[in-house]
Image (cartoon, helix red, strand yellow):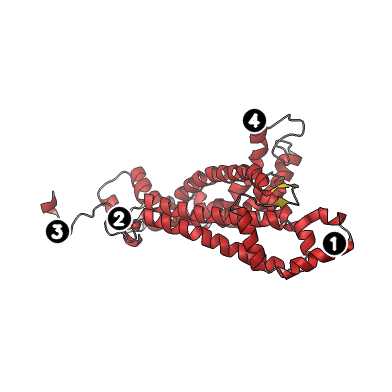
Amino acid sequence: MDHDRPRGLTRPRPGAGTRGGGTGALVARRLLLLPVLAGVVTLVMFALAQRSPFDPVIAALGERALTLDGPTLEAMRARMEDTSAVQQWLTWWGNALTGDLGYSSSQRAPVSMVVGQRLPWTLGLVAASLVVSIPVGVALGGWAGTHPGSVLDRLVGPGMLAVQASPPFWIGLIAVWVLAVALGWLPTGGATSPQASGVEPGDVLRHAVLPVLVLALAHLPWFVLVVRDASRDALEGAPVRAAWARGIPRGRLLRSHAVRPALLPLVTVLGVRVPELITGAVLVETVFSWPGIASATVDAALRLDFALLAALTVLTTVLVVLGNLAADLAYRWVDPRVGQRDG
């Protein structure tokens, strides 16, 4: 009952104490920031492209420029040099807002078609790697943190640091050499078998095992180490000592007072690691010839496909902003007091 509460303390109402409207205001602010950020990033990209030493005609037309004669190429170069980066940026956004993202010279298809076909492959790869790495990271980190000095605890630290220091492409090459070439258990790359008549779920899953495991292993150390350290810090806190004094069973105490508080730093790491997930996907997709959007980024950069690069730049910006927003919302869901503190 309320009369048992010390004087001067009142029960906080849902949403009370939040600034800017709480979660709704947070989502609104991020969504309003998104077009501004996408515009700035693409403007910088066009400015860098104009000042690069590459031939602007080759960058715009790709291999089609080889079919043009000398005077036509020189006239196009002069016209492009007279067009400022801001004008090119405005023209691209004017076309993009009407649904015209241009033509990809590296993929020989409309940019919208390339993005639509390849994006699900990348999202599936990243999502599957998180489904593998997060539970394993929580389990390993939680056990090592709640059993300090154990054999697993002594192995986790050096082992995860060694994995963390290894580039994803190197891990991928080792995995291909051992599991695909030496043992022959899994395919070396691609998403489907050459003899497959179409996209068969079983065939895709078999080809996805290696890239998913490599991408999950590349991000596993961050999750394991942060959960281990947070669980260890929680065990040394006053709430755990009080719980021990009350006679709470060990298993329940470790789950509720050690591992569960470690989920908050884990969510923070997830939000910070969104760009790293995309970078890791680029390297893994390149090693395994995975038909995702990340490998298309490498092809677009090597072949000066600025139409595709511009669209992928906007897409990456959107994914990073939405990923960080999802992490912030998850943080508030795990600990509602965050919304009461900072809105």
User: In the picture shown, does residue 81 fall above or below 219?
Assistant: below
Residue tagged 1: 72
User: In the picture shown, does residue 183 fall above or below 274?
Assistant: above
Residue tagged 2: 239
Which residue occupies the foreground of this view, 162 or 100?
Answer: 100
Q: Is residue 340 left or right of residue 64?
A: left
Neighbour tally class for label 1: few under 14, some 14-19, many 20 plus, Cα within 10 Å: few
Q: Quadrant of residue 88 in the image? A: bottom right
How far apart are the alpha carbons under marks 2 and 1?
77 Å
Q: CB atoms at circles 2 and 1 under 8 Å apart?
A: no
Res 171 seen here: no
User: In the picture shown, does residue 255 fall above or below 268?
Assistant: above
Residue tagged 4: 202
Res 191 seen here: yes
Residue tagged 3: 6
Q: Secondary structure at mark 3?
A: loop
Which label is found at residue 151? none
First reached walking from the N terminus: tag 3 or tag 2: 3
Which residue occupies the foreground of this view, 53 or 74?
Answer: 74
Question: What is the x, y in percent for residue 135?
Answer: 49, 44
Q: Residue at x 50, y 53 (%)?
A: 322
- Which amino acid is tagged 1? Thr
Q: Which marked residue is nearer to the observer: mark 3 or mark 2?
A: 3
- Which amino acid is tagged 3? Pro
First reached walking from the N terminus: tag 3 or tag 4: 3
How far apart are the alpha carbons under marks 3 and 2?
21 Å
Q: CB atoms at circles 1 and 3 under 8 Å apart?
A: no
- Which amino acid is tagged 4? Gly
How far apart are the alpha carbons under marks 4 and 2?
49 Å
